[in-house]
Amino acid sequence: QVHLVESGGGLVKPGGSLRLSCAASGFRFSDYYMSWIRQAPGKGLEWVSFISTSSSYTNYAESVTGRFTISRDDAKNSLYLQLDSLRVEDTAVYYCVRASREVDYWGQGSLVTVSS
Amino acid sequence: DVVMTQSPLSLPVTLGQPASISCRSSQSLVYSDGNTYLNWFQQRPGQSPRRLLYKVSHRDSGVPDRFTGSGSGTDFTLKIIRVEAEDVGVYYCMQGTHWPYTFGQGTKLEIK
């Protein structure tokens, strides 16, 4: 059974940083692209980033390019998202999801709140 | 970016009656490999999204067969043959053909 469990969210001031982690289980992690998708409170879904197998390729939404960095550790079955230079508008639940263009499984989400 | 436009945004439905959600894209969603990467997700209140359909019409394991997807090019539809109480939530279409992948605004289905 596929499980994706996010951690690392919390309250941070504008300009601050956070690192989100996602622990994956129930499937061969190294075989899959992985992604982060976010949802602002009461709003819709926005793609943030994806990373290919072997970390050979990454892509980012324009709104986070240069501020967020996606990475993975296949030995630890883990996905990460480094969030730097955070803005109030980055406040959202961040979901770890399996795959990219055919995203299927989602984690429960980790809330990031950016506020002074 | 490809804009995904859903309608209606609010969908009150009587139990046992059908429901239909339209999703239109600003560009064709046919990818260079010949596939059309159009997914449908259901988000029940307080839960993470769950994929219902992928590549327009392929139903995920465990998804009731009352959910069907159709369409091509830029025009897609999610249909629920007979709405049940557990179908309450927000439905999103998502395109995975052009980066950045994008979602529709969401359609909130409620029981009348």
Image (cartoon, coloured by chain):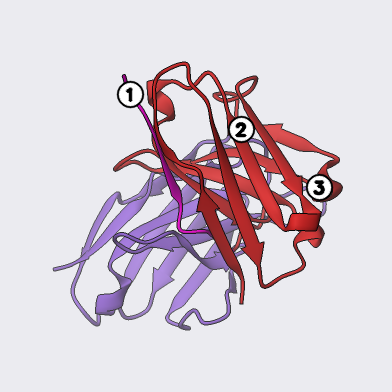
Chain colours: A red, B purple
Mark 3 secondary-structure assignment = loop
Looking at the image, residue B51 sits to the left or right of residue A31; the answer is left
Mark 2 secondary-structure assignment = strand
Instruction: Give the residue type that dot 3 points to.
Output: Ser
Q: Looking at the picture, how far across and down is residue A51, in whole percent?
A: 73, 43
For the C terminus of chain A, the image quarter is: top left
Q: Can you say whether A47 is above or below B51 in the image?
A: above
Mark 1 secondary-structure assignment = loop
Subunit that carries the residue with mark 2: A
Are both tags, 3 and 2, on one chain? no
Disc with the residue nearer the chain's start (1 vs 2): 2
Tell me if label 3 and label 1 are in contact, CB under 8 Å. Answer: no
Instruction: Give the residue number, with chain letter if any, for mark 3.
Output: B32
Q: Can you say whether A31 is above or below B59 in the image?
A: above
Which residue is at a point 45% across and 82% down the rendered structure image?
A: B64
Which residue is at a point 61% across and 33% down the rendered structure image?
A: A82
Instruction: Give the residue number, with chain letter if any, for mark 2.
Output: A82
Q: Look at discs 3 and 1 and give the one toward the viewer.
A: 1
Q: Residues within 10 Å of mark 2 (few under 14, many from 20)?
A: some
The mark found on residue A44 in the picture is none
The mark found on residue A115 in the picture is 1
Instruction: Give the residue type that dot 2 points to.
Output: Gln
Q: Looking at the picture, how far across and down is residue A71, in whole percent?
A: 72, 40
Subunit that carries the residue with mark 1: A
Magenta-colored span: A105-116
Instruction: Give the residue type that dot 1 points to.
Output: Ser
Q: Looking at the picture, how far across and down is residue B79, in whole percent?
A: 41, 69
Tell me if label 1 and label 2 are in contact, CB under 8 Å. Answer: no
Q: Residues within 10 Å of mark 1 (few under 14, many from 20)?
A: some
Q: Looking at the picture, how far across and down is residue B111, in whole percent?
A: 18, 69
Which residue is at a point 69% across and 53% down the rendered structure image?
A: A78
Residue A33 visible somewhere in the drawing? yes
